[in-house]
Image: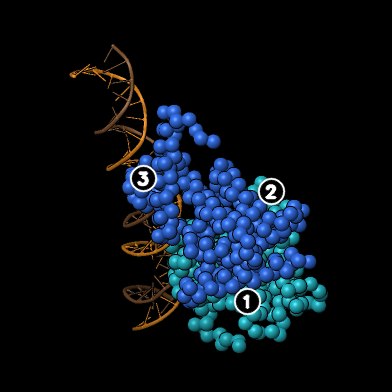
Chain colours: A blue, B cyan, C brown, D orange
Amino acid sequence: MTQRNTFASLKAKLVDDKRRIIIDAAERVFASKPFNKVSIRDIAGEAGISHATIYSYFADQQSLFVEAFVQGVATIEQRVEAIAADEKKDKIGRVAESYVDFLTENDHYFKMMTHFMLDGSLGEKPIEKLNSVGRSLLDQFERLLTPGDTRHTSRMRAHNFFAALNGILITFRDYPGRPMAEVRRHMKKLARQTAELFESAGRT
Amino acid sequence: MTQRNTFASLKAKLVDDKRRIIIDAAERVFASKPFNKVSIRDIAGEAGISHATIYSYFADQQSLFVEAFVQGVATIEQRVEAIAADEKKDKIGRVAESYVDFLTENDHYFKMMTHFMLDGSLGEKPIEKLNSVGRSLLDQFERLLTPGDTRHTSRMRAHNFFAALNGILITFRDYPGRPMAEVRRHMKKLARQTAELFESAGRT
DNA sequence: TGTACATCAGTGAACGCGCGTTCACTGATGTAC
DNA sequence: TGTACATCAGTGAACGCGCGTTCACTGATGTAC
């Protein structure tokens, strides 16, 4: 649906664009330093504005963080969708690998995810936003694992698949004393193995 | 090896006991409020001492936290050991359930674990301590999943089992809008299902 | 037995820092006449 | 066209808070003579 170009809509778009600039700056900062060290001032600096300005576009820090995170999940969903739609075999394995791969390369998303999952002190609106993206990712996984099946057990299987992949990431992200490349190879191998478990269980 | 009761050994024991009192106080505080809100002052208050005193017994905050965490892992290992040693069936399933159960009930341990895994800014000594308890837990899992087998693949399987359980915890701990009891039931069910996957894969 | 001194665990106060958030103000742009 | 006024996005400075950590000091206990 294309919108009529009223003055009001132009202005709304301008506001949106500015929000986007801030979110993009946030992403760059998240990629460059540990998530829990990122401050409003950092992001403002990266965006080239005063830190006070951010509060004209976002209610508070958490809202901004959540929006940046949602951004990342959207990217993951696109990847999964692409694999689901192609004609090649071994979809489950490739999705598992792709998921782990993306979240190792952009590990600030993963850090944010765990942060949100563990923190608990989120506002209602951010929570609803997070739940919504979570649900839609689970939907994708469910379609992938058990196409055409919408029973309770099939949702459970999607839950477990999702959990297993997250578990690989949280458990082996910081495998001590190993070079990054090797850690990633190890995690991908684990993801493959997990995919096999779900694949063979799906055939029964 | 029993130690000779020298004056020096008595004094060493006294210091140890005091450390223990502080650690125990820390545990009680961790159980009562969110992990990331716990301060040195809280713990000192609970232990009935000045917060400055803590620095006579621990190098810094992280060292104290790590020691409290190691405490928790020891409890888990005891539980797993008990299940591994008994004569009943379905060891894998019961271990999975017990693991998830313990870390939901005492979820500050889980929060600490993820915190350490994600943080990265730990000193060398704490890291070595964490790795050591991690390894010994993985050893237990490996013996449980593939008794008598010490091949590379069997270690991998233990890794994946460990990761899958952690994943269940991190992913569904805060299942939105559901009462705690129901969430726990759900997680235990997922743990059971995971155990089945590993059980049946182990039979091949 | 008594006195002067040494040790040292424990303490409250203070330091220093970083950060999220608010606020009074500015200066550019738009509007009314 | 020019002038006085209104609006409002953007800003730097300041507020307030919490916290980890340090430090000078105290007072109880032990030691030497």
Dots 3, 2 in contact, CB < 8 A: no
Q: Is residue B90 left or right of residue B125?
A: right
Q: Which residue is mark 2?
A: B178
Check disc 1 and report the residue beneath it.
B156
Residue A116 horizontal/vertical position (percent): 55, 53
> Disc 3 marks which residue?
A51
Q: Secondary structure at mark 3?
A: helix
On the same chain, marks 3 and 2? The answer is no
Q: Residues within 10 Å of mark 3 (few under 14, many from 20)?
A: some
In front: label 2 or label 1: 1
Residue found at the very far right of the displayed protein: B88
B43 or B89, which lies in front? Answer: B89
User: Which image quadrant: the N terminus of chain B?
Assistant: bottom right
Q: Is residue C31 above or below residue A55?
A: above
- Which of A153/B36 is in front? A153
Quadrant (top left/top right/bottom left/bottom right) for the C terminus of chain B: bottom right
Cα distance in 3D space between marks 3 and 2: 37 Å
- The residue type indicated by label 2 comes to Arg
Q: Position of residue A146 (x, y in %)?
A: 72, 58
- Sort mark 1 into few (<14), some (14-19) or many (20+) by Cα contacts within 10 Å: some
- Residue A101 in view, yes or no: yes
